[in-house]
Image (cartoon, rainbow, N blue to C red):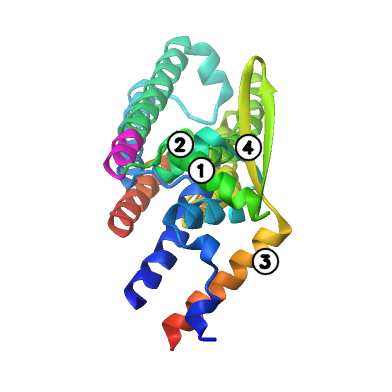
Amino acid sequence: MNQQHQEDLAHIRSMMERSSRFISLSGLSGVFAGLSALIGGLYAYQLFGSDRTSYTDGASYSENINLVDKLITTAVVVLVCAFTFGIFFTIRKSKKYNLPIWTSATKKMLFNLAIPLLAGGIFCLALLYHQIYGIVAPATLIFYGLALINAEKYTFSDIKYLGFCELVLGFISLFYIGYGLVFWIIGFGILHILYGLILFKKYK
Amino acid sequence: MGIIDKLNKDFESRVRLGIMSILMVNEWVDFTEMKNLLNITDGNLASHSSALEKAEYIEVKKEFVGKKPKTSYQVTPRGRAAFKEHLSYLEKLLKS
């Protein structure tokens, strides 16, 4: 009898959770997104090194169209890789645990994540337009942090700690403008890998 | 009357517990999503939801989206109170 009531309570809890939060997010998505960012970031770093251009100096970009093209290509490849890995591991996890993916919780999570991300994207485009390159990396970190904190209600709530770390890192990098790429690699590369491993261990 | 008798008979089935749990934390949930979350068949969900509707624990809304009929569920204040009571009895039973 007791056993049955205990199972009832466990069932209630699991139904409340899986209907209101997006829990198919896999830690491995974080690890592979982080690896993509790390490799992409290091490649970009090496691009700057070989061309002897300063990353904050707007003039060096307009002289060097080739570099800008390469940087944009790298960024797009990193984005596509991270996204593909994210979707792949999410589908894999939801199949394994028999969780529905496209629920209203998922839609709410994506919507809340998208608001600060879109705002940040437009903000960064404006920075590029005005050739204020030095603020781009800190801005991506700050808006990404805000997006994670905003989406926290609809997925694993630990995601907010990653959000706070990205936010703080973004603020620090605002004061060390020449090192934007280094902070970007730490925030999007290393923090994602660490966070992904923690999430993977915790919710395995 | 023992505490066991106080447990709400309307919530005896796992499916009904599931429906109530989902509706406690979501506003309107449609038929397809409910079915997928609980991992049950159409007929199973239909019979349990109509039982809960009869007890006035949930409200059923039927509407047309384009040409397709869409059924959604929402918990009533009465249902919310009954479910909370049920939960606290379960808790007491486990403590004793």
Of A124 and B37, nearer the camera is B37
Same chain letter for marks 4 and 1: yes
Residue A15 % position (x, y): 46, 54
Q: How far apart are marks 1 and 3 (CA)?
A: 22 Å
- Indicate the chain on which mark 1 is placed: B
Predominant secondary structure in magenta?
helix
Mark 3 element type: helix
Q: Which amino acid does label 2 sit on?
A: Gly
Q: Name the residue under label 1.
A: B47
Residue A17 % position (x, y): 48, 54
Q: Name the residue under label 2.
A: B43
Same chain letter for marks 4 and 2: yes
Of A33 and B2, nearer the camera is B2
Label whose residue precedes the other's in the sequence (3 or 4): 4
Task: Say whether residue A203 is magenta.
Answer: no
Can you say whether A91 is above or below B90 in the image? above
Q: Can residue A178 be seen in this view?
A: no
Q: What span is colored magenta in the figure?
A: A89-97
For label 1, the crowd category at 10 Å Cα-Cα, with few meaning under 14, some 14 to 19 and many 20 or more, is few
Label whose residue precedes the other's in the sequence (4 or 1): 1
Front position among marks 1 and 3 = 1
Residue located at (44% from left, 58% from top): B13
Same chain letter for marks 3 and 2: yes
- Indicate the chain on which mark 3 is placed: B
- Indicate the chain on which mark 2 is placed: B
Residue located at (34% from left, 40% from top): A94
